[in-house]
Image: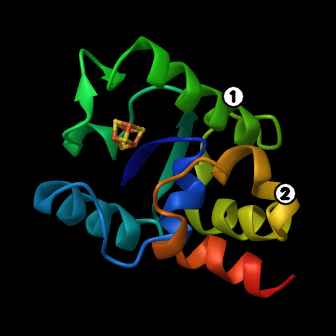
Amino acid sequence: MKLVLRGHHLLCLKGFQGYGYDENFVENMAKVNSLKNLDSTTISLTNQADDLCKSCPNLKNNLCKNQERNEIIRKMDDEVLKKIDSSKEHNSVELFKKIDEIFNNEESVSKICFNCMWHEKCLFYQKLLNNR
Ligand code: SF4
C-alpha cells in the first residue's frame, strides 16, 4: 500500500488514540494508522492535502479551512520535512522509527505542536511532556 502524508501528520499518527473531527475522519485515520505498521507500506511526503485530509471536514478547495490557516499548517509540515528527505518514497516502519529518533523531546516538536488543539489527547505529545 502506498500512502501520501503531510509532514506533521507523521507526528499526529504517532499520537492517535481514536479522537478526530468526525466519525468519517476517525475511521480513515484508524485505517491509515494500522497501514503505517505494515512493512509493505510505503510513504511519500508532502506539505499539501494528503490521505488524512481527504476524509477531513476541514478540507475546502484542497486547503485546510482557508488560505491563512493552510499556510500555518504548511509551515508545520515544513518543520518536519526539513529533517526528512521528501524527495523519495519511504518504508513506513523505518520512517516512523526515524520519527521517534528525531522528535524525542518537547523542544524538538515545539514549533510543530505548540498551537495544536489536540495537545491533551495526543499520546505522542503527552509522552514527550512526561519525559521532561
Ligand atoms: S484538512 Fe487540515 S485539519 Fe484536516 S487533516 Fe488536513 S491538515 Fe488536519
Residue 42 drawn at (x, y percent): 51, 52
Q: Amino acid at mark 2?
A: Ser
* Residue 78 location (% of width, % of height): 69, 31
Q: Quadrant of ligand 1?
A: top left
Q: Which mark is residue 73?
A: none
Q: Which residue is nearer to you in this view: 46 or 58? A: 58
Q: Nearer the viewer, residue 39 or 23?
A: 23
Q: Is residue 109 visible?
A: yes
Q: Quadrant of residue 76?
A: top right
Residue drawn at 47 percent across, 55 percent down:
117
N-terminal label among 1 and 2? 1
Task: State how far apart marks 1 and 2 are (Cα).
Answer: 22 Å
* The residue at label 2 has a CB less than 8 Å from ligand 1: no
**SS assignment at label 2:** helix
Q: Residue furthest bottom?
A: 130
**Location of residue 15 in the rendering, given as x and y in whole percent from the top left corner:** 52, 71
> Is 59 rendered above or below residue 111?
above
Q: Residue at x 23, y 63 (%)?
A: 26
Left or right of residue 123: residue 26: left
**Residue name at image x 59 percent, y 46 percent:** 8
Q: Is residue 37 visible?
A: no
- Residue extending furthest left? 23
Question: Mark 1 near mark 2, Cβ–Cβ under 8 Å?
Answer: no
Category of crowding for the residue at label 1, using alpha-carbon neighbours closer than 10 angstroms: few (below 14), some (14–19), many (at least 20) = few
Q: Using the image, determine if residue 7 lies above or below residue 130.
A: above
Residue 108 lies, in percent from the top left, at 84, 57
